[in-house]
Amino acid sequence: MADISATPSEKMTNPITDSSGDPVTLGDNPAHVAGFLHEVSRYFQREGLHSALIRYGAVLLKNGTTAVSQLNQIPFVLQSITYASGVEPISFAFESPFPIDVDDAISTFNGLHPGHNFDPFKVTTVPSGFIHQPLVVQQEDAKLGGMLLRAIEDETFREEMQDKSGGNGRVLLRLLIEHGKTAKPRDITLVTTKYNAIASAGVSGPLTRESFNEWIKLLLKARRAVPPKSRSSDDQICEVIDQVFFGDQAGDVGNLYELHLSQHRPDGNLVKHLKMARDLLGGRERSEQILEAKSKLSLLSGVTVPDASVVEALARGDGAAAVALFSGPSKDPVKTKRSFDPGSIPRDAQGRVSEWVPGMADCPCGRPKCVIWMCQRDFPLWWDSRKYIGPSLKGRRLRGGRTSGNPVVSCHDAPEGGPSAGIIRGGTSVRRESGPEQ
């Protein structure tokens, strides 16, 4: 049978989160269940999910009609049941969802009215605004069950709950509630002790945006595992955050935090409190990065105007990017290649370079420490052929413009060590086959 509890994309992630956006998960400790279900209930309230299913066993469709699996549950949806005087009306909620079989709810009513002679649940026709669609309700139950199962961390416990519930959300919800009732005092002590330890320890190491986020994530996760009656309130969490900032001994974080408290006044709102703390730490880090970038720029000798990308990075407050972009002074590639003073080059009486010095351009002939004009003087044939045909040696032209397929190169045109020495051997002449006329 196909699994209709979730689509493939839904199976990959747990969509249930707390008010801070962190995932809500259930561990293997029974004491976690109460806290887990409390957060799930709040998530469903924020997102408007499964309310009709949990309270009435019905599904509100997009066209405004209400789908029910059994007709005799319609009086519960309409809240049209008349109770005897002094009898508390039956109600269902997240902690006690509407039963799968409406007869269970009717039995509860009958137990409150022994010997009554009226039947408020007899429905023969479907009233306007309702539709009898058991499959729609079944599918909604499967979606609820899929969300709850994906939030269970322990694989063995998750499979056990899936087998017992058959993937039905309301059945699974009741099973989890019963599982939570099995928690022993030591189970509850364990979760509360873990939370208190994280709260007391505070942030480890320097107080930065990253270290604060890691600590608060652990703290909120530990609090979610604590039963609602034993857990700290949002106001108490805010007090713990205040102590972390005021207790930081490095720099002026405490003074800045106190100033932010007086300006923003989060008033115990945990979401606003966290945003204020993160903004403070993030702004402080950006200021330090800008100062570092400016300091590095001021130490660079010979630089009057930094690169445009560096200026742009500083303007937007991204000091780290400015430092990364500006690792050193701007350099002209032409000037950087010359590592000598042109005035110190040895020259002859005619002002020509008489000796190669390090930093000068290499001669095209490839010989080390070769002065170009001297090479042209000593090896005219090589330079003449290079002038016409380049390094490919195709379509060689002789002096005077005459073209021949077999030019003669004399051994006297290639002194020992010259660039043509590779093609001249032992005082003989060598003929080369030319390519086609270009």
Image (spheres, helix red, strand yellow):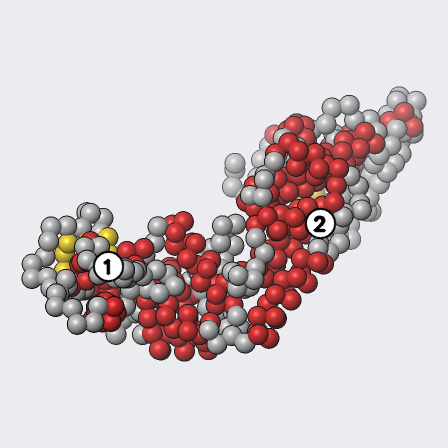
Q: Residue at x 82, y 26 (%)?
A: 302
Q: Is mark 2 on a helix, strand or loop?
A: helix
Q: Residue at x 32, y 55 (%)?
A: 51
Residue at the far front: name it: 85
- The alpha-carbon separation of the residues under discs 1 and 2 comes to 56 Å
Q: Which of 109 and 156 is in front in this view?
A: 109
24 sits left or right of 86 in the view: right
Query: Is 172 rendered above or below residue 402?
Result: below
Q: Residue at x 68, y 46 (%)?
A: 242
Q: Nearer the viewer, residue 398 or 117?
A: 117
Image quadrant containing the N terminus: bottom left
Q: Tell me the kind of residue under disc 2.
A: Val
The location of residue 341, given as percent across then percent down, is 88, 28
Q: Which of marks 1 and 2 is in front?
A: 1
Q: Residue at x 46, y 59 (%)?
A: 38
Residue 187 seen in the current view: yes
Q: Nearer the viewer, residue 225 or 154?
A: 225
Q: Residue 138 occupies which quadrant of the picture? A: bottom left
Query: Is 405 rendered above or below residue 27?
Result: above
198 sits left or right of 178 in the view: right
Mark 1 closeness class: few <14, some 14–19, many ≥20 residues within 10 Å: few
Q: What element carries label 1?
A: loop
Q: Residue 322 occupies which quadrant of the picture? A: top right
Mark 2 closeness class: few <14, some 14–19, many ≥20 residues within 10 Å: some
Q: Mark 1 points at which residue?
A: 85
Q: Residue 262 occupies which quadrant of the picture? A: top right
Residue 138, disc: none
Q: Name the residue under label 2.
A: 244
Q: Nearer the viewer, residue 9 or 179?
A: 179
Residue 406 seen in the current view: no
Residue at the far left: name it: 124
